[in-house]
Amino acid sequence: MTPFHALIPCAGSGSRAGTVMPKQYQEVAGQPLVMHTLRALAQVPGLQTAWVVVSPNDAFVWPEANWPERFQRAACGGHSRAQSVFNGLSAMLAADVPAHDWVLVHDAARCLITPDAVTALIEACRDDPVGGLLALPLPDTLKSQGPLADQPARVASTMPREGKWLAQTPQMFRLGALHRALALAADQDFEGLTDESSAMERQGLSPRLVVGSALNLKITYPADFAFAALVLRGRA
């Protein structure tokens, strides 16, 4: 099996979370949110290395006790998620990680990911010519909003939900292929790229969709922290 690695962009500010510090460093269930994420990934069988991409001026005091083996921090985060991922991939290639290896990009703020879910993605995609991502078929009625200037916001139309999925992470692609796809978008400052799959789609590729879990949410809003704490304590 081709080796696989993890890359965790961890340089964002998380402005919508309403926290004083970046949301990935907010304490949840007794430890920083990002540490729950890293410890879940550390339990994935066969993971070769993991790269945590932090801001060059990152001031967080990282816990060294029980730091996962083969995990390292790279202070090369950029001004956007796509920039941080691109810089992290560049650092991996510079460290002689083979371009043909798989890389699983996972959001630092998706702290409820489970090793089983990551393993399911790996098993589904390890022989795929493109790669793929965890995602969830859209369960709810989908509405489009009218003019954004309208206050309060009002519905413009109801959209069909059939065939629509909510993208999650990890997203798993060949290191070299993903780096090339992002490099082609770098001149436009990665405009319009909200995840790794969208970069691959621009190359005419169709990543595989692997059913994830509703629990694998990205911590974004203040109420999400209480929900995550409840789930993590329940698991413990």
Image (cartoon, rainbow, N blue to C red):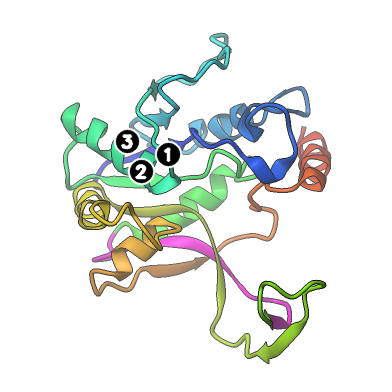
Which residue: 68% across, 48% down? 220
Q: Which amino acid type is shown beneath numbered disc 1?
A: His
Q: Position of residue 53 (x, y in %)?
A: 41, 31
- Indicate whether residue 233 is drawn in magenta: no
In this view, the residue in front, 37 or 195, is 195
In this view, the residue in front, 69 or 77, is 77
The mark that comes first in sequence, 2 or 3, is 2
Mark pair 2, 1: CA separation:
6 Å
Residue pointed to by mark 3: 88
CB atoms of marks 3 and 1 within 8 Å: no
Q: Is residue 24 above or below residue 171?
A: above
Q: Residues within 10 Å of mark 2 (few under 14, many from 20)?
A: many
Q: Which amino acid type is shown beneath numbered disc 3?
A: Gly
Q: Position of residue 80 (x, y in %)?
A: 43, 44
Q: Residues within 10 Å of mark 3 (few under 14, many from 20)?
A: many
Q: Is residue 168 above or below residue 80?
A: below
Residue 78 in sight: yes
Residue pointed to by mark 1: 79
CB atoms of marks 2 and 1 within 8 Å: yes
Q: Is residue 65 left or right of residue 97?
A: right
Q: Which residues are magenta?
A: 127-143
Residue pointed to by mark 2: 83
Name the front one of labels 2 and 3: 2
Q: Quadrant of residue 17?
A: top right
Mark pair 3, 1: CA separation:
13 Å
Looking at the rendered structure, the secondary structure element under dot 1 is: loop
Q: Which amino acid type is shown beneath numbered disc 2?
A: Gln
Name the front one of labels 3 and 1: 1
Q: Position of residue 159 (x, y in %)?
A: 64, 89
Residue that extends furthest to the top in the rendered view of this protein: 65
Q: Residues within 10 Å of mark 1 (few under 14, many from 20)?
A: few
